Image (cartoon, rainbow, N blue to C red):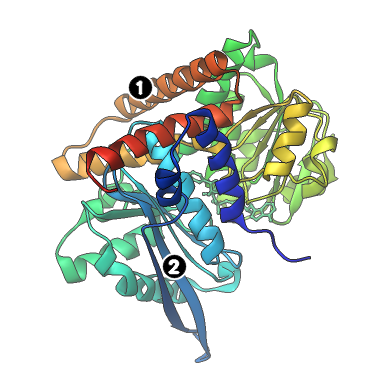
Amino acid sequence: MAKSSSIDAVNQYFAEAARVIDLDDDMFGVLTTSYRELSVQVPVRLDDGELIVARGYRVQHNGARGPYKGGVRFHPAADLDEVRALASLMTWKTALMDLPFGGAKGGIEVDPAGLSADELQRMTRRFAQSIHHVLGVYRDIPAPDLNTNAQVMAWMMDAYSSVHGYSPAIVTGKPLDLGGAPGRDSATGRGVVYVLDACCEHRGIDLASQRVAIQGFGQVGNWVARELADRGATVVAVSDLKGGIVRPAGLDVASLVATVRAGGSVVDHADDAGVEAVSNEELLELDVDVLVPAAVEEVITEDNADRVRAPIVVEAANHPTTPGADKILGDRNVLVIPDILANAGGVTGSYFEWTQNIQQFTWKEERFLTELADRLAKACRDTQAFADERDVTLRQAAFAIGIKRVSDACRLRGYI
Ligand code: NAD
């Protein structure tokens, strides 16, 4: 079956929200296409002498409200269509959070799993060299995403700085020793739980009583699990690329984190007492209170949406739910907390890092987390109030708020 188009799906969500705010056709045309799409060749010499030629992308969707902002991923599915869709989501996310940024995304269409550190570094530098002319501290600021991390950001910063001079603010999600912000590491995952907590509170649900399944135990998923465990919720299932595990009485999150940090997989715990193996597909259909997709796109589709048993789905991953699945979940009264709200702690934390780099002044982690919680709480209140007032879903409300802010900025700047 041909892969469905991710940008068509995101634009379907856009269209639903645009109708709610009566967006005019001219603005619709501008905001459903990207401003700039750069596609570059990324040749990488492997350690054994073989050459692979990957393709890299940087898509800048809209910059009306500030410099383009968005992550870079290394993934075999990171083609132009996917990067385009993710760039568009970043525009609505930064606007929903009222950050002075636009939206962008980057990616290299490659499976980094077998690459050595040297190969990864060569690939990252080549990509950065090929896109540096569209980046800038006040133009476009990348960050980590799937299969990229603080080390990859350090290499990007170095490649950029070797041309433009020392520029720590050119990327966020850096190592602490290079201008990273204490708190940024955990911001996306913790933010997911702050948002979930706010949505639960609005509905009179006690977060500590919730049983949660998390798909993906990487940068985002592991922090979701840790924050949930700290708040007394029960993490009953987790997974990664190798598969999943479930323990109805609750998993030992700290020991899972230690295993993954040491380079292992959550499935290394499949033989622990009371633990059973579960596939990534089965995890989505477990009898839990909250389901957190925190891995890749389009895992909840029209094929499995009617088997999702959790009454709450929190989209920690970007675009985990197709529009068809979203409709099925909505019809079944499943509360879907949309990606552009749920995982917005990441870009908000990146904003804090960027401002600290520009001011050359580092905040303490407590301040970072307090500001993060405040901003997410406000975005939750705005989104919930809009949804209640207009009788629309949280996704429609979140998109509508973002679209309105961006279209106002486009008009004020005389863009159209
Ligand atoms: P990561 O590479 O650190 O972790 C990804 C996790 O998902 C790993 O555990 C991996 O094994 C697992 N995984 C990969 N492919 C899978 C598959 N097909 N099925 C099941 N599990 C799979 O990436 P991350 O930074 O944690 O990003 C996860 C999601 O969160 C992505 O959608 C990303 O766009 C989104 N996100 C990340 C950030 C951030 O700050 N890192 C911010 C906002 C949104």
| Numbered disc in front, either 2 or 1 | 2
Residue 394 — which label?
none
Kindly give the residue lying farthest to the top in the view shown: 204
For mark 2, does the 10 Å Cα neighbourhood hold few (<14), some (14 to 19), or many (20 or more) residues? many
Q: Residue at x 59, y 72 (%)?
A: 114
Mark 2 C-beta closer than 8 Å to ligand 1? no
The amino acid at mark 1 is Thr
Q: Residue at x 48, y 45 (%)?
A: 89
Where is residue 25 drawn, in percent x and y? 45, 44
Point out the tag, 2 or 1, that comes first from the N-terminus: 2
Determine whether, in the image, residue 312 is placed left or right of residue 352.
right
Task: State whether residue 64 appears in this view.
Answer: yes
For mark 1, does the 10 Å Cα neighbourhood hold few (<14), some (14 to 19), or many (20 or more) residues? few
Q: Residue at x 81, y 49 (%)?
A: 279
Task: State whether residue 191 appears in this view.
Answer: no
Where is residue 69 drawn, in percent x and y? 35, 49
Q: How far apart, in angstroms, are the residues tagged by discs 2 and 1? A: 35 Å
Q: Which residue is mark 1?
A: 370
The amino acid at mark 2 is Tyr
Q: Which residue is mark 2?
A: 57
